[in-house]
Amino acid sequence: MKRAALFACLLSLTSPAFAQPPSATGGPITNQAERDSIAARVRGGAACSGCDLFQIDLAYQNVAGRDFSSSRIRQANLSVAIADRASFQSANASLTNFFGARLGRADFRDANLDHATLVGAYLGYARFDGADLTGADISGAELTGAQGLTQEQLNTACGDGTTQLPAGLTVPTC
């Protein structure tokens, strides 16, 4: 019995890292152990499309190229994270802290970035088609070459004199 348990444990360590959705029913996680398990898999390199990552702390982590599409990343901390080419498409990243994060070519299409902090973030060539930037702070952010970013979206966000935007776009001052 011990040998079988050891074998199962070793097999799980050699399997590819893919986090699972929030629960079998797709509903929110109510079990803290399950939430911690998913967070640990993500920190260990797993992608997590459609996951409940509410308040996950990924500060200073490298999550480049990972798929977080349709995930709940609300109130998460991705400050100074590296998330180049990561997909946040259709994710709820409202109130998330992306302070100083590197998000080059990240996909934020249809994402909820309501009141997100993107202060000092690098967002060069990121995609923003349909993203909600209401109340988002993009002070000091670099959005050079951003795709799908509209003046209408920026009118609901705020920035400062150091915010770098694609030609012809402006952002209200915070």
Image (tube, rainbow, N blue to C red):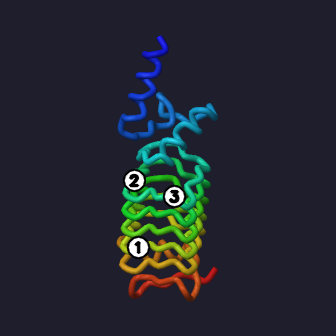
Instruction: Answer with left or right where residue 110 lies relative to residue 157.
Output: left
SS at mark 1 in the image: loop
- Circle 3: is it few (<14), some (14-19), or many (20+) Cα within 10 Å? some
How far, Cα to Cα, is label 2 from label 1?
22 Å
SS at mark 2 in the image: loop
Identify the mark nearer the N-term, 3 or 2. 3
Residue at label 3?
61
Count of numbered circles on the image = 3
Identify the mark nearer the N-term, 2 or 1. 2
Residue at label 1?
149
Q: Residue at x 51, y 68 (%)?
A: 101
**Residue 129 seen in the figure:** no
- Say above or below: 152 vs 72: below
Closer to the camera in the image, 12 or 94: 12
Image depth: mark 2 or mark 1 in front: 2
Q: The disc labelled 1 sits on which kind of residue?
A: Leu
**Residue 127 seen in the figure:** yes
Point out which mark residue 164 bears: none
Closer to the camera in the image, 88 or 9: 9
